Amino acid sequence: QLQLQESGPGLVQPSETLSLTCTVSSGSISSSYYYWGWIRQPPGKGLEWVGSMYYSGSTYYNPSLKSRVTISIDTSKRQFSLKLSSVTAADTAVYYCARHQREYSSSRYYYYYYMDVWGKGTTVTVSS
Amino acid sequence: SYELTQPLSVSLALGQTARITCGGNNIGSKYVHWYQQKPGQAPLLVIFRDDIRPSGIPERFSGSNSGNTATLTISGAQAGDEADYYCQVWDNSVVFGGGTKLTVL
């Protein structure tokens, strides 16, 4: 059973860069069926998608975060990472990594994505 | 940007049928996916592509999507189904609904 595990600092100073890594327990991160990405959840609030990346480098980012987000992949280590710059208290959240299934609908002529495997999440607090 | 609207909460008695809606402009033209999230846990995919249950999800969970509304139906709701439920679509980015808190009395 594939598992994802987030790791990284639990406390980040305001204006600095938040950095998290997700390690994939098994299988290939280079599969053509998947993107790999991040979702966050502020305390007491709903889910917010951050972005995702294909092993070859293609990325999608949340338009509201795009200027501050970078996602990268290291296929040799089966890891992908999130960097979020210039953080404020509003970036305090539980951050989840997740495998994004990528499928094509021949009847609707478009690709669509959903998250079928999630990590347990890691809490990141932005505070001085 | 595309928006999804869910009721904040749904309450029902044990054994009744819960229907959680997800509204969006012509949402029927998109595929809708549903997640269950229990307190302190990561979300769990319960329905994808409108009406398909992943392996291990009970048959009492079903989904439909037409027009401007998608619906997650939980038939014979159990106490263990109490959770937050989120709908999601793809619109050049992942879009989540605001979430619905299901209470089983």
Image (tube, coloured by chain):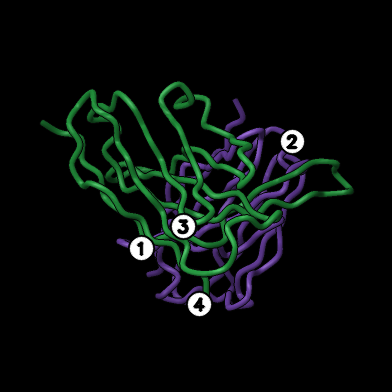
Chain colours: A green, B purple
- CA gap, disc 3 and disc 2: 42 Å
Chain hosting mark 2: B
Q: Residues within 10 Å of mark 4 (few under 14, many from 20)?
A: some
- The one of A4 and A104 positioned closer to us in this rendering: A4
Q: Residue furthest left?
A: A128
Specify the amino acid type for callout 3: Lys
Q: Mark 3 points at which residue?
A: A77
Type of amino acid at the residue the image marks with label 2: Asn
Q: Where is residue B59 in the image (x, y as percent from the top left)?
A: 64, 77
The residue that label 4 is drawn on is B15
* Earlier residue among tags 2 and 1: 2
Q: At 65% from the left edge and 41% from the top edge, which residue is drawn?
A: B90
Residues behind callouts 3 and 2 on a single chain:
no
Task: Name the residue beneath numbered marker 2.
Answer: B26
Q: How crowded is mark 1: few (under 14 residues within 10 Å), some or many (20 or more)?
A: few
Q: Is mark 2 on a helix, strand or loop?
A: loop
Residue A18 found in image quarter: top left
Q: Do the residues labelled 3 and 2 touch (CB within 8 Å)?
A: no
| Element at label 1 | loop
Q: For the point 53% across and 32% down, which residue is it?
A: A61
From the viewer's perspective, is the residue at label 2 or at label 1 nearer?
A: 1
Of the two numbered discs 3 and 2 in the rendering, the one whose residue sits closer to the viewer: 3
User: Hey, which quadrant is residue B58 in on the image?
Assistant: bottom right
Residue at the spot of label 1: B41
Q: Position of residue A70 (x, y in %)?
A: 45, 32
Mark pair 1, 4: CA separation: 24 Å
B64 in relation to B98, above or below = below
Badge 1 vs badge 4, beta-carbon distance below 8 Å: no
